[in-house]
Image (cartoon, rainbow, N blue to C red):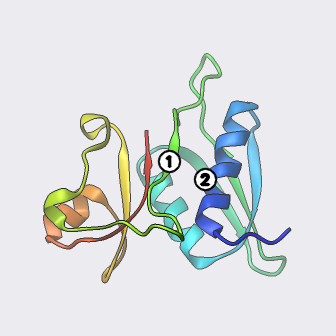
Amino acid sequence: MAFNDPIAELLTKIRNAKDAQHRYVDLSFSKIKVKILEMLKSHGFIENFLVNEKDFKIRVFLRYTKGRESVIQNLKRESTSGLRQYIGYREIPRVFNGMGLAILSTPQGILDGETARNLKVGGELVCTVW
């Protein structure tokens, strides 16, 4: 199935898998998805992910608490293909008072909100995770 917005596909599939309490979810491969997943892994929102470039697939292992509750509470696509949201480094949101994560596409690559704020670089607000 072809999707127009690969980032929205990534967020929707992760959201649906965590709601159904699946252990993992399979996605189609793209470089921007890998960068976003690296960021989610480094901030502890997902357990791990495996990339199979031969089959163009990514398997994302979701992270749960001991009570089988997902670490990710919600994922929101901020900038859509119909309405891009570009922000300066001063307008980067603090998601849940720093407990969440804002992901930006900047001239220096895909960055989290805190790193972009420290480097004083703005860009497209891709999504927020909490």
Q: Which mark is residue 76?
A: 1
Quarter of the C terminus within the rendering: top left
Q: Residues within 10 Å of mark 1 (few under 14, many from 20)?
A: some
Residue 36 at what x, y percent from top left?
Answer: 50, 63
Position of 3 relative to 18 (above/below): below
Secondary structure of the residue carrying tag 1 is strand
Position of 50 relative to 64 (above/below): below
Residue 77 at what x, y percent from top left?
Answer: 50, 54
- 86 sits to left or right of 128: left
| Residue at the image position 71 percent from the left and 41 percent from the top | 16
Residue 129 at what x, y percent from top left?
Answer: 45, 45
Q: CA distance from mark 1 to mark 2?
A: 7 Å
Residue 47 at what x, y percent from top left?
Answer: 58, 45
Quarter of the N terminus within the rendering: bottom right
Q: Which mark is residue 11?
A: 2
Q: Residues within 10 Å of mark 2 (few under 14, many from 20)?
A: some
| Residue at the image position 24 percent from the left and 35 percent from the top | 97
Query: Across the whole image, how many numbered discs are drawn on residues?
Result: 2
Extreme top residue here?
67
Q: Disc 1 vs disc 2: Cβ atoms closer than 8 Å?
A: yes
Which amino acid, by three-letter code, is at mark 2?
Answer: Leu
Residue 112 falls in which quadrant of the image? Answer: bottom left
| Residue at the image position 19 percent from the left and 58 percent from the top | 91
Residue 4 falls in which quadrant of the image? Answer: bottom right
Position of 11 relative to 51 (above/below): above
